[in-house]
Image (tube, grey):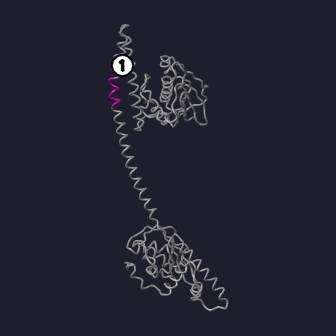
């Protein structure tokens, strides 16, 4: 391979280290190792001793052969380093990682394998000599390859005392995929944050528009309703029905404007709640009385089954009444003509639950969540049933604002049941 910038230090390579490592590498790669050659490598440099028989030497050679084979089969780069911080042994994974050949790595200072900014720290660790056995554990650095490219790596470094000297073993893992995933994740987070900011700005703009529109509509509507009431006092029997239509249409439109205004306030975080201790029984009675006129118009019956409440709830009483009115009137409008709306209540642990059930056509399971979307009427917009699809959306936001929960149980043809749970105090 061509000479590399960090290959100029190869003159420090020691011949015995190179030759021994080459023998180990070739032995690990062979299918049937030359035991005599391996044995000679195992005996090299060992003093003569009576116990060093051919059988013992053969066992030593076989053990070294197995160890070398395992070293070269390791998926991560394993680098042996002597007490001077010079590379003395490498495995096949190290050659692949650094895109080098064995002669390009042996005798090279370990610090030269890392990108410049990391070298001083590593040199200081190697010069310290003493200290804990594990000097580094899973530290992310940048490795410098033989082809002048860099690769992100994770480095662990262990101190290995050998006789009176200290050697080191470095374990180096390519973490390019991990770093790339981290970069992609950071980019995705940035994009999501930007999209979230845009969505919040759009939501604020929408809420501001709804608030301004509602205020602008409410003023002329109040004037229309005021004049309609005056006309009712002076209208003849012939005109009374027309005046009544004007009044009902005006009140309906005003209620819609108020609901839209409430939704915009909640979304903008500007709704004011007067939370306090209240008797839910009184709120139910008030709401039922308010919905009674609509029930009479539809020939429906409102049946209150719950016992007298024995607990108080932490709510805004006016908003709780509004929630119950919305649920009961929905049951009246969307229930069976001449049917029954049942209102029930009970305590469940630290919550008070109110349940409103109707006997209408019900809601398909996959459309239940859509019922809470503003202006979503689930197909009823093509019928004569009055409504705008705002009531349930506002109800859920009011319930959540009072730290409560709301859910719908329904099956096609079996009516719908709405459960609202609020905190007991």
Q: Which residues are magenta?
A: 213-220
x and y, in percent, of residue 70 in the image: 57, 74
Q: Residue 334, how many percent across, how many down? A: 49, 24
> Secondary structure beneath disc 1?
helix
Q: Percent from the top left, x then y, of residue 147?
A: 38, 74
Toward the viewer: 380 or 27? 27
- Quadrant of the frame with the C terminus: top right
Residue 4 lies in the magenta-colored region? no
Foreground of the two, 38 or 253: 38
**Tag count in the figure?**
1
Q: Is residue 112 above or below residue 301?
A: below
* Extreme-front residue of the structure: 32
Around disc 1, counting alpha carbons within 10 Å, would you say few (fewer than 14), some (14 to 19), or many (20 or more)? some
Q: Position of residue 135 (x, y in %)?
A: 52, 72
Q: Residue beneath label 1, please?
A: 225
Q: Quadrant of the N terminus?
A: bottom left
Q: Classify residue 390 as left or right of residue 61.
A: left
Placement of 3 over or under 213, stated as above or below: below
Q: Is residue 5 left or right of residue 420?
A: left
Q: Height in image: 325 above or below 263?
A: above
> Measuring 35% from the left and 41% from the top, which residue is drawn there?
202
- The kind of secondary structure the magenta stretch mainly shows is helix
**Residue 73 quadrant:** bottom right
The residue nearer to you, when weighing 105 against 259, is 105
């Amino acid at each position: 391979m061509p000479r590399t910038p960090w290959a100029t230090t190869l003159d420090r390579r020691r011949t015995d280290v190179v030759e021994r490592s080459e023998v180990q590498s070739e032995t690990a790669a062979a299918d049937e190792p030359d035991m005599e050659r391996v044995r000679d490598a195992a005996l090299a440099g060992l003093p003569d001793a009576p116990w060093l028989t051919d059988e013992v030497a053969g066992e030593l050679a076989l053990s070294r052969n197995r160890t070398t084979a395992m070293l070269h089969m390791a998926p991560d780069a394993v680098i042996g380093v002597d007490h001077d911080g010079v590379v003395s042994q490498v495995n096949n994974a190290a050659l692949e990682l650094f895109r080098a050949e064995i002669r390009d790595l042996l005798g090279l200072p370990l610090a030269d394998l890392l990108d410049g900014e990391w070298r001083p720290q590593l040199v200081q660790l190697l010069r310290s000599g003493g200290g804990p056995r594990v000097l580094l554990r899973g530290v992310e650095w940048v490795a410098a390859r033989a082809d002048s490219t860099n690769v992100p790596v994770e480095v662990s470094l262990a101190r290995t005392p050998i006789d009176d000297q200290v050697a080191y073993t470095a374990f180096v893992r390519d973490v390019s995929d991990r770093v790339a995933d981290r970069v992609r994740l950071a980019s995705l987070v940035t994009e999501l944050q930007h999209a979230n900011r845009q969505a919040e700005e759009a939501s604020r703009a929408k809420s501001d528009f709804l608030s301004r529109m509602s205020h602008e509509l409410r003023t002329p509507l109040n004037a229309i309703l005021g004049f309609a009431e005056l006309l009712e006092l002076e209208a003849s029997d012939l005109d009374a029905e027309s005046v009544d239509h004007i009044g009902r249409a005006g009140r309906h439109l005003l209620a819609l404007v108020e609901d839209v205004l409430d939704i915009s306030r909640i979304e903008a975080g500007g709704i004011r709640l007067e939370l306090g201790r209240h008797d839910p029984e009184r709120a139910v009675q008030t709401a039922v009385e308010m919905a009674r006129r609509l029930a009479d118009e539809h020939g429906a019956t409102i049946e209150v089954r719950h016992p007298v409440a024995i607990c108080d709830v932490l709510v805004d009483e006016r908003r709780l009444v509004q929630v119950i009115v919305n649920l009961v009137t929905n049951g009246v409008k969307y229930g069976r003509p001449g049917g029954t709306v049942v209102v029930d209540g009970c305590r469940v642990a630290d919550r008070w639950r109110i349940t409103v059930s109707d006997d209408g056509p019900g809601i398909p399971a996959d459309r239940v969540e859509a019922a809470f979307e503003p202006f979503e009427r689930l197909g009823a917009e093509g019928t004569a049933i009055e409504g705008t699809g705002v009531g349930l959306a506002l109800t859920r936001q009011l319930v959540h604002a009072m730290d409560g929960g709301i859910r719908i149980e329904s099956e096609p043809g079996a009516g719908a049941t709405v459960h609202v749970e609020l905190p007991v105090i």
